[in-house]
Image (cartoon, rainbow, N blue to C red):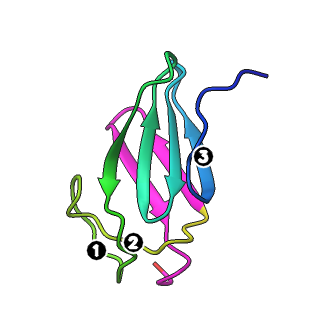
């Protein structure tokens, strides 16, 4: 067991890449955590929304998304937005 990060608000889903990067759904955002512990928001914003596809902060999804998939071949991230049924 290795601790990668602390202080993430309400994590609900997790995906990992072959390089050891983690993607975490937390509070209407997707946070990327690198193996060195650095992190940044790669999608969403801090406001729970109606479920809108898009890059970066233009993506909008519910606060309690319960699934995430990272597709390595395309670099796309898919979120199961249970809050909005999308």
**Who comes first in sequence, dot 2 or dot 3?**
3
SS at badge 3: strand
| Residue where numbered disc 3 is placed | 14
SS at badge 2: loop
Please tell me which residue is depicted at 27% across the width and 67% down the height of the picture. 53
Left or right side of 39 for 53: left
User: Residue 59, percent across and down?
Assistant: 27, 64
| Residue where numbered disc 1 is placed | 52
Q: Is residue 38 above or below residue 71?
A: above
**Who comes first in sequence, dot 3 or dot 1?**
3
User: Residue 52, percent across and down?
Assistant: 28, 74
SS at badge 1: loop
Farthest residue, direction right: 1
Q: Is residue 69 above or below residue 80?
A: above
Q: Is residue 81 above or below residue 44?
A: below
Residue 61, label in figure: 2
Residues in magenta?
A: 67-85
Q: Are the two marked residues, 2 and 3, in contact with CB atoms closer than 8 angstroms?
A: no
Q: Are the two marked residues, 3 and 1, in contact with CB atoms closer than 8 angstroms?
A: no
Badge 3: residue crowd in 10 Å (few <14, some 14–19, many ≥20): some
Q: Is residue 42 above or below residue 72?
A: below
Q: Are the two marked residues, 1 and 2, in contact with CB atoms closer than 8 angstroms?
A: yes
């Amino acid at each position: 067991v290795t601790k990668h990060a602390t202080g993430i608000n309400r994590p609900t889903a997790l995906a990992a890449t072959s390089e050891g990067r983690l993607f975490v759904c937390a509070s209407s955002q997707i946070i990327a955590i690198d193996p060195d512990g650095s992190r940044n928001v790669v999608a969403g914003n801090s406001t729970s929304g109606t479920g809108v596809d898009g890059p970066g902060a233009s993506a909008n999804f519910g606060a309690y998304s319960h699934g995430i998939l990272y597709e390595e071949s395309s670099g796309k991230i898919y979120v199961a937005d249970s809050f909005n049924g999308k």
